[in-house]
Image (spheres, rainbow, N blue to C red):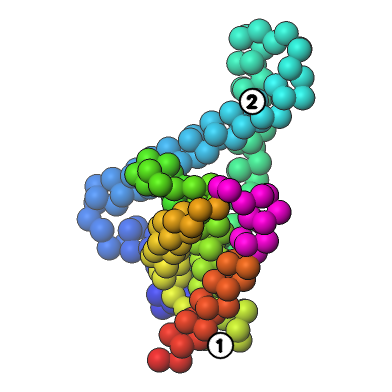
């Protein structure tokens, strides 16, 4: 077994065979607690989206009482929980290291979303044009880094480059693109300018990634 090919199996093997008695139980308890906290917050978020943005939007005059809303939330929690359990039973079919696969999927949107919150809280001159386009550039950079081997046919980059690259692009591009006075432009003009800037960024980042992988 090697870390590059059997990383998902080596970690539990190390916990169960090499940690002292008691410590392995604490580690497993910590893993389960972290998983439960992540699942509970995710399920609550999905329930809130379904209840507020779908059910109440489609049926605004249904006259639903608080008891009805709580009952609906419980049914949604049960359904989402069962779907989550069903999906976890086939996680072994996913090829590759699970940590790497997770970073190449879920983590693609992490830094673009963080950039939006960062601009809203700490950058007073931020504009909608800069925020949205910065998030798109951040996602594009994360996608290129994550799937460089499939996109270019060259050796892939480490998945650990995804987050720092997307973070730097998110903050830097959003702040720079908020400087031009784009509020006076019409919506079609902003869309056209955004498409040009995004295409130029993707082309420039592709050339930079090509030079990086050749070194």
Q: Quadrant of the C terminus?
A: bottom left
Question: Vertically, is 201 above or below 188?
Answer: below
Q: Answer left or right for 23 relative to 211.
A: left
- In terms of secondary structure, where does tag 2 sit? helix
Name the residue tied to disc 2: 52
Name the residue tied to disc 1: 154
Question: Vertically, is 44 above or below 17?
Answer: above
Q: Is residue 189 visible?
A: yes
- In terms of secondary structure, where does tag 1 sit? loop
- For residue 89: magenta? no
Nearer the observer, 15 or 132 = 132
Question: Vertically, is 17 above or below 215?
Answer: above
Q: Quadrant of the N terminus?
A: bottom left
Q: Main secondary structure of the magenta part?
A: helix
Crowd rating for badge 2 (residues with CA inside 10 Å; few <14, some 14–19, many 20+): few
CA gap between label 1 and label 2 equals 45 Å
The numbered dot on residue 205 is: none
- For residue 192: magenta? yes
At horizontal 40% and vertical 47% (from top left) the residue drawn is 125
Nearer the observer, 106 or 4 = 106
Q: Which residues make up the magenta segment?
A: 183-195
Q: Give coordinates of residue 40: x percent, y percent.
A: 49, 34
Seen as rendered, the residue at the extreme bottom is 214
């Amino acid at each position: 077994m090697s870390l590059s090919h059997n990383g998902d199996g080596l970690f539990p093997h190390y916990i169960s065979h090499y940690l002292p008695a008691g410590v392995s139980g604490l580690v497993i308890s910590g893993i389960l607690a972290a998983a439960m906290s992540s699942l509970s917050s995710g399920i609550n978020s999905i329930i809130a989206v379904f209840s507020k943005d779908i059910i109440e939007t489609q049926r605004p005059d249904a006259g639903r009482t608080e008891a009805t809303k709580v009952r609906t939330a419980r049914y949604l929690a049960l359904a989402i929980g069962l779907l989550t359990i069903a999906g976890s039973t086939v996680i072994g079919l996913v090829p590759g290291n699970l940590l790497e696969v997770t970073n190449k999927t879920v983590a693609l949107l992490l830094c673009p979303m963080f950039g939006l919150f960062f601009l809203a809280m700490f950058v007073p001159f931020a504009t909608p044009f800069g925020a949205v386009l910065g998030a798109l550039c951040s996602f594009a950079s994360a996608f290129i880094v994550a799937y460089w081997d499939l996109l270019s046919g060259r050796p892939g980059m480490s998945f650990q480059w995804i987050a720092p690259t997307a973070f730097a692009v998110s903050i830097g591009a959003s702040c720079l693109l908020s400087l031009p006075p784009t509020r006076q432009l019409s919506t079609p003009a902003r869309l056209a300018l955004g498409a040009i800037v995004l295409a130029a960024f993707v082309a420039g980042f592709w050339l930079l990634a090509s030079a990086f992988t050749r070194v």
